[in-house]
Image: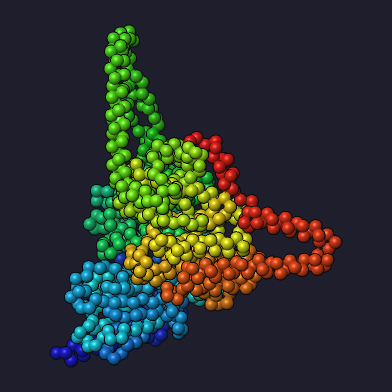
Amino acid sequence: MRSSTSAMMVSMLHLLMFLATVPQAWAAVHGVARGGGGLLHIPSVASLAHCHSQCGNISISYPFGIGPDCFRQGFELTCDTTTRPPTLFLGNSTTQITYVDDDAVGVVASAIGFNITLIPGVHTYNRTWEAPVKGFMLGEDSSLYVVGCDVDLYLLSHNTTDIIGACTSSCADNRQTMENTNAESCQGNNGCCSIWLQQDLQAFWLKLVRHDGAVAEPEEVLPNVKVIMSQYYDFHTDDLYSSWVNSSNLRGVWLQTPIMDQPSCGSAQINKDNYACNDESTCRNLLPGKGYYCSCNSLMDGNPYIRDGCIAAYNPKVKEDCTKSCGNMTIPFPFGFEAGCFGKSNFRLNCTANKITILDRGYAQYRVTKVSLDNGSLTVSNMLNNTSSNNAQITAYTAQYKDHAVYEGQAFEDLFDFSKEDEIKIRWVVANLTCQTATRSATYACISNHSSCVHVYRGKIFLGYRCKCNNGFQGNPYLELEDACTDINECSLPNYCNETCQNYEGGYKCTPYKRNLLLGIAIGIGCGLGSIVIALGAAVLVNKWKKGIQKRIRREYFKKNQGLLLEQLISDESVTNKTKIFSLEELEEATNNFDATRVLGRGGHGTVYKGILSDQHVVAIKKSKIVEQTEIDQFINEVAILTQIIHRNVVKLFGCCLEAEVPLLVYEFVSNGTLYDLLHTDITVKCILSWDDRIRIAVEAAGALAYLHSAAAIPIFHRDVKSSNILLDDSFTTKVSDFGASRSLSLDETHVMTIVQGTFGYLDPEYYQTGQLTEKSDVYSFGVILVELLTRKKPIFINDSGSKQSLSHYFIEGIQDGALKEIIDSNIVEEADQEDIDDIASLTEACLKIKGGDRPTMKEVEMRLQFIRTKRPRRTQNLHGNDGEIEALLSPNARNHHEHINLVNEAHLTSQGISGCYSLEQEFASSISLPR
């Protein structure tokens, strides 16, 4: 029986290995991108009329196509109608396609999988993959998942030994323990780990290494390891013991599909005969030398690969015979089902045979439960097809794009912005235009009488415009009908007017009832005298009663906010002189009742106000946003940590208030904003950082973090080191802030296991993979800040080819390619010595090592930066020693010039290298006129 099972497993291995190589072999023999049936010119709509536009439930648009003269060279598809439903394949390969992008930027293909049988005595296994069609690339938003026990997997570039990523998957001692595990994500210690793909790939190879002693006999351990490349995978422990994984847990991979008959737009536009883009479109390079793609020009939509295929992006007109509902839900224009019934393609919905309204975004389908024109949103109850896993994915997408700087606050797609609240909502706009620009367009959407244009923002990011009926009107502002926006009769509604009500178009008027004036006077005099006596007595009692209630409420809030615990903490002799508990009245008076004009900034955890205490001391007051126990725990954590820290480069905590529903923290006021603003805001309105300033800021920030790690009473890991948490005071001294996510540990601990928390772009990859927080996690994040100081680029930025790129990966690639001078800030190149630049770059590279053990400690980083900083004054003194000779060679006025340099140097020293910037004194002077 044992030998029969082993033979069956070997046969399965051979079959899977054969299937993995079939796409490449078949493509090579039959020519997936055949030139014979592929077009090399721009076709018309009429010439494509005979072509299939559908395979099963998958829509197909040119340049993809099925059959002769229906596709551009390299974009042939095959529809297998023998299956139910029909299935779509890339050319004559076995690569199944589940979605074709309307703009022909790419397709979603079935997940890539390898099933590797572990053989006793064999420790290393290699597998390779290449794109089934030349030029096609695996999109960077996919992940590689490893399902198996006690193995290491390395993802490497094709035909090289360059490691793209690695992960370790380990299991418990026996199968029974694993079967009792309910984990549903790849955490590394539950039989599954993952590698996030951060770059596009045309090919890759895998190296699987089994741990020594992990496999003795096939019967004692898991017989195989599964390796899957997918956009998303919902892990279940049952997958460890199956011959393959449940396909419902997988999501396909994104293949980018550029036009590859020419390497770039420049070479393609030379030969107009085979140029792919029509006259109303723009050519865009995908990557240098990797092909190009086309997109319709601004304010246009449609197919850029067909003659006259780009049309107006929004159609304000609607057909008369459109379907207006699906089931019991009404669908208002600009949304619709049939062609000509929706304003633009993004507003197209589908109504299933079961009367369910579907929004199909290609990568996922959403079940729509409500369409709101008033606030411009779609409400979705869940995502169809594998609801649990997809809901988990949208939650992950929401966290990624809402709180981090991945796309600098832009919408998840060009018109859609995901927000996770009590329910999932998708906010939308008509077009990415201002109202002023939109009103001059022939496709202006707000065409109803009594309608107006509204700007839509996400935070401070402008998304576009939408329409609404004017105040006092209701209806559909997108329809050109006389009664599209109709008057609201407020007089017929409850609680609008309890007196005589008069309705008019767009509003209403309330007037008092006519009363007998003399009767009113008589009643008033009769009742007034008695009422005065009663009122005076009642006022005293009510006032006393209100004060008692208010006192009890504030005491309850005090207990709820862990006030008793904080009182014990603050009463400690070591912190008494620097921390106090403020009353709510003090802080309300200091902020003018938390007036909106006093807001300094808003973040994921709350709002910061500027306050002026009774002693005229200017402070910053942080008010938590959400009343949840986790927020209160983070509040306590921040107080506990800051009361133990005494360092000139750590923001000082003056005290806290516990009497409000949400706790408040009172900090020293830091007047000159964040390092992130100074580096990345328009430099025409901010000071330009000198090389000395950048080194000084780095030294001060490193010193503060080194103090937290090794000199504080207990070691503290910050866990959210980023440039927006480094503040600059009036003299531009560095202040490290925001300790809500920090963790402290005992002296005998070197790490702590936590839920992964931090900011995308700064997050330590090792911490992200293992959940193991160490001091080296802060070192990696600090390394990203050093790269920001060197390059003046954001942690995630748009590169020259229009793609999003990780700053740390971009910097490491630049160093490896010997292009350091080309990627750093031009101001540094002009100002700094090459030796200093090389020293900083070398230190930064060490901080960004993938393995934490290879990184220096924060103390070593600080000492290295101090050494680099001290070298510069010595060079300057050596240079000034020859001033006399230099002056004699320059001009007769050299002496005056030298005096001018000295004056500049004195000014430079006075402001610590940054001149012309706003000071604390100016801030304080301007605040005197504000109401307290």
In the rendered view of the protein, which quadrant contains the N terminus? bottom left
Residue in the foreground of this view, choosing between 881 and 895: 881
In the displayed structure image, the side of residue 335 where residue 669 appears, left or right:
right
Residue in the foreground of this view, choosing between 617 and 37: 617
Above or below, 45 relative to 349 = below
Residue at horizontal 69 percent and vertical 55 percent from the top: 906
Q: Quadrant of residue 4?
A: bottom left
Above or below, 469 relative to 265 = above
Residue 432 image point, x, y percent: 48, 52
In the displayed structure image, the side of residue 568 where residue 280 appears, left or right:
right
**Is there any visible trace of residue 635 in the rendered image?**
no
Residue in the foreground of this view, choosing between 926 and 349: 926
Residue at horizontal 31 percent and vertical 13 percent from the top: 528
Tell which residue pokes out farthest to the front in this image.
573
In the displayed structure image, the side of residue 45 where residue 58 appears, left or right:
left
Residue at horizontal 41 percent and vertical 85 percent from the top: 28
In the displayed structure image, the side of residue 370 where residue 693 appears, left or right:
right
